Amino acid sequence: MSEHDLDPAQFRLAMGRLASGVTVLTTTTDGHDHAMTADTLTSVSLDPILVLVCVENETRWLAAVEQAGVFGVSVLSAEQRALAQWFATPGRPLHGQLDRAPHRRGPHTNMALLDGALMHLECRVTASHPAGDHLIVVAEVLSITLPDDVGPALVHFRGSYGSIA
């Protein structure tokens, strides 16, 4: 089988066997919050401290973060499954997206950070790289919040949400 014969559906199934943490990414433009569920947060570097996220080219969030230049990351706990599902819902209204998600504003970026998350990052975009139907967004971490009391993590595995302690 050549690389041109690969089936995208089979690749999706294969990658679904890699358990990953679930995050909500937030940004703000023109006075409106934008949020989306993502499971591609990856650490890149310790000096400087960098992370990356991979975002589908057609998302409203991507257009907003390209304008804002900053974003927040909330790594979700197992108790936040409903929020992960909400922020992954295509076509949800732009206005009031965060109404059902208790949150606070980050001190460095003023981005929404979800209450009850396992950790928060505030990030400034430093680079972006086209990659097929996605854009790889590289960002410098400006702040890290680690709550003292954390429960099990929400994970994505084989197309479903689960938890791991």
Image: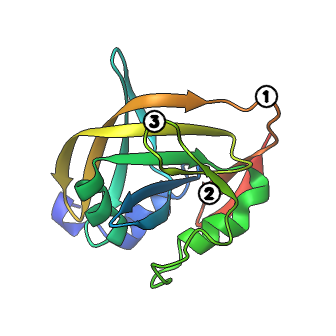
What count of labels does the image hold? 3
Q: Say if residue 56 shows up in the picture.
A: no
SS category of the residue bearing label 3: loop
Camera-nearest label, 3 or 2: 3
Q: Amino acid at mark 2?
A: Phe
Mark 1 lies on a secondary structure that is loop
Mark 3: give few (<14), some (14-19) or many (20+) Cα within 10 Å: some
Residue matched to label 2 = 157
C-alpha separation, residue under disc 3 versus residue under disc 2: 33 Å
Q: Which residue is mark 3?
A: 108
- Could you tell me which residue is drawn at 20 percent across and 46 percent down? 128
Of residues 131 and 91, the one drawn nearer to the viewer in this rendering: 91
For disc 2, the neighbor class at 10 Å (few under 14, some 14 to 19, many from 20) is some
Q: What is the distance, in whole Å, between disc 2 and disc 1 at their CAs?
A: 26 Å
- Res. 148 mark: 1
Which is more foreground, mark 2 or mark 1? 1
